[in-house]
Image (cartoon, rainbow, N blue to C red):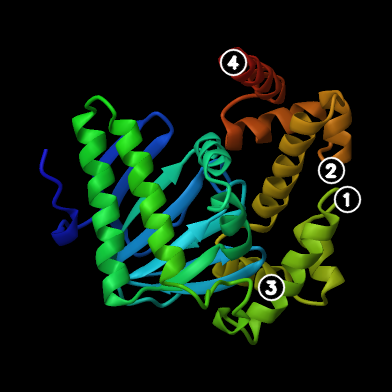
């Protein structure tokens, strides 16, 4: 199948391309400008996001940034993030293509080639990059090469895809000697007025999500109206207040399931959920499995890795 996403003129909400194979996935979408992410706010895959048309507001680590057409966005594995519409944006739609790479693949490549440190780079230098014309051409070529290999599914296609990823990463690192990432270039974040207020509130939620929090209590804590808080928080972050609290709680619960032997009941208590039932319901909404099923899947994955080593 000939891939033509470089010149897509499709209107409206439509999937232009989707392939997933052996821990590599490419998804190309055209969507209305007012579309907001509803799920997958954090996932185990590393994400490489190329915005082809339109503008998006990106939210990372409690700060908001604006992405323009041609920007490349890197999202770390497990990082809470949001892509959402910009209030008052006159654009009618946006177009983007995303490459997802499983964490296991990155760990494997980093083990084979220690000097690459791909995982560490994403962790430290996630964010939005303004590409030069040459970088843009190389990034598009990378996507097209990987999509072509996914379509063919020929012998050694996986090796060819990994080779393209490694070479693309090397080029990107070499052509960005002065790395402009969100961690280092804070001037890129939106600021002033409601943004600064929301940053204070989101920082507070991040520090206190295990406690009893609500729209009412936060409005009282920060001396603002519930209406203003709710509207401003959504405009800046793309999340509702309760949604953001629950996402932080689920991510913490996920970590405790991975790293401890605590019971699900104890994890519910430590993460601020009022009951094990509520934890189960919210956890399944974001992870598509119950906490018990998630823990069981970790055991199965570990056993499979041990068998293959």
**Above or below 20: residue 14:** below
Residue furthest to the left in view is 2
First in sequence, mark 3 or 4: give its number. 3
Q: In this orientation, which residue lies closer to the viewer: 125 or 96?
A: 125
Disc 4 vs disc 1: Cβ atoms closer than 8 Å? no
- Name the residue carrying label 1: 211
**Above or below 178: residue 100:** above
Q: In this orientation, which residue lies closer to the viewer: 65 or 176?
A: 176
- Residue 23 seen in the current view: yes
* Circle 4 SS class: helix
The quarter holding residue 236 reads bottom right
- Name the residue carrying label 4: 304
The residue lying at 81 percent from left, 65 percent from top is 204
Disc 3 vs disc 1: Cβ atoms closer than 8 Å? no
Disc 2 vs disc 3: Cβ atoms closer than 8 Å? no
Give the CA distance from mark 2 to mark 4.
33 Å
Disc 1 vs disc 2: Cβ atoms closer than 8 Å? yes
Can you give x and y, in whole percent of width and height, for residue 270 in the image? 88, 39
**Above or below 216: residue 272:** above
**Above or below 290: residue 18:** below
């Amino acid at each position: 199948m000939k891939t033509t996403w470089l010149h897509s003129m499709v209107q409206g909400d439509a999937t232009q391309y989707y392939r997933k194979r052996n821990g590599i996935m490419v998804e190309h979408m055209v969507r209305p400008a007012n579309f907001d992410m509803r799920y997958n706010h954090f996932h185990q895959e590393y994400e490489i996001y190329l915005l082809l048309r339109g503008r998006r507001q990106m939210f990372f680590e409690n700060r908001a940034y604006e992405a323009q057409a041609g920007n490349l966005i890197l999202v770390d594995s497990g990082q809470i993030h949001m892509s959402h519409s910009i209030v008052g944006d006159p654009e009618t739609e946006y177009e983007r293509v995303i490459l997802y790479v499983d964490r296991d693949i990155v760990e494997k490549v980093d083990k084979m080639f220690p000097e690459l440190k791909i995982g560490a780079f994403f962790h430290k230098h996630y964010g939005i990059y303004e590409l030069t014309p040459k970088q843009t051409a190389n990034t598009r070529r990378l996507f097209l090469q990987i999509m072509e290999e996914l379509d063919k599914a020929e012998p050694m296609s996986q090796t060819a895809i990994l080779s393209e990823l490694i070479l693309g990463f090397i080029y990107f690192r070499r052509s960005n000697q002065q790395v402009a990432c969100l961690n280092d270039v804070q001037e890129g974040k939106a600021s002033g007025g409601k943004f600064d207020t929301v940053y204070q509130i989101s920082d507070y939620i991040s520090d206190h999500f295990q406690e009893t929090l609500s729209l009412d209590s936060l409005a009282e804590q920060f001396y603002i109206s519930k209406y203003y808080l709710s509207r401003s928080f959504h405009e800046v972050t793309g999340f509702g207040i309760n949604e953001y609290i629950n996402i932080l709680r689920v991510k913490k619960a996920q970590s405790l399931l991975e790293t401890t032997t605590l019971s699900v009941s104890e994890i519910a208590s430590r993460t601020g959920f009022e009951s094990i039932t509520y934890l189960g319901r919210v956890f399944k909404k974001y992870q598509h499995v119950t906490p018990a099923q998630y823990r069981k899947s970790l055991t199965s994955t570990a056993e499979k890795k041990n068998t293959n080593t």
